[in-house]
Amino acid sequence: MSNPVYLALDLPRIDAARALAEKVKGHVGGFKLGLEFFCAHGHHGVHEIAQVGLPIFLDLKFHDIPNTVAGAMQAIHVLEPAIVTVHAGGGRAMMEDAKAAAGENTKVVAVTMLTSLDERDLERTGVSGSAHDQVLRLADLAQDAGLDGIVCSGHEVGEVHRRWKHGFFVVPGLRPAGSAVGDQKRVVTPRAARNDGASVLVIGRPISKADDPLAAAKAIEGTL
């Protein structure tokens, strides 16, 4: 992948999202559309952004019984997403069915642990041990289930890459040096994540909320 940056386009207005996508398309590798965007704009919104001409990452984080997730995956075939997410916490059978139901050219990756969580949050949900250990456990489960890769923070991607040599690793929660962390608790720079084996770098606010989004996208691309 020549440019691993996927811009998170979770904007409430489709015209604003399309305009931003057109503005930065020469300096990103694709667009991530999450729950906020998909719930607001559905299939029509995805088609609108796809017309910009770059790959689409549908970050829908499917998590339900295996049959339901398989049905949901089949329902988005027509959108031809490059990447779709499921939650690793849904278990091996759910992940196996999700992969089996996905389009031939769609990579299915498992969300291990949200980058907004830390160890205290894990403990409150009944999971003992470190965030690092939890990510590794779920990464092993995703690999056993036959998925293409996982979503994890930049703090874990290096270790996961060493254990899963040919995995596809999506790293969100990235912040360029000197930018605000916001609600993310486990962040690294795009360059550091790429060096550690990240396949896709998901970047949102540092570009979308910048005074000059095009300049911000160019600056991030320049660090890679």
Image (tube, rainbow, N blue to C red):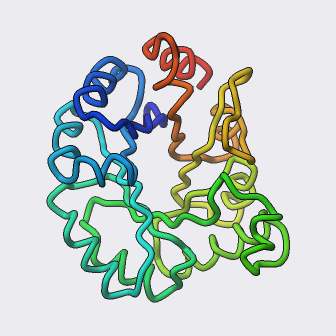
Residue at screen point 58% across, 48% down: 171
Q: Nearer the viewer, residue 107 or 110?
A: 110
Position of residue 123 relative to residue 173, above or below, is below
Q: In this view, does 181 lie to the left or right of 53?
A: right
Q: Nearer the viewer, residue 56 or 69?
A: 69
Q: Where, by quadrant of the figure, is residue 51 drawn?
A: top left
Q: Nearer the viewer, residue 98 or 191?
A: 98
**Percent position of residue 214, x then y:** 43, 14
Q: Is residue 153 left or right of residue 221?
A: right
**Percent position of residue 152, x then y:** 63, 56
**Percent position of residue 67, x then y:** 31, 88
Residue at screen point 79% across, 70% down: 133
Residue at screen point 34% across, 78% down: 69
**Percent position of residue 159, x then y:** 75, 58
Position of residue 22 relative to residue 50, above or below, is above
Quadrant housing the C terminus: top right
Quadrant housing the N terminus: top left
Position of residue 143 relative to residue 9, above or below, is below
Residue at screen point 51% across, 41% down: 202
Count of numbered marks: 0
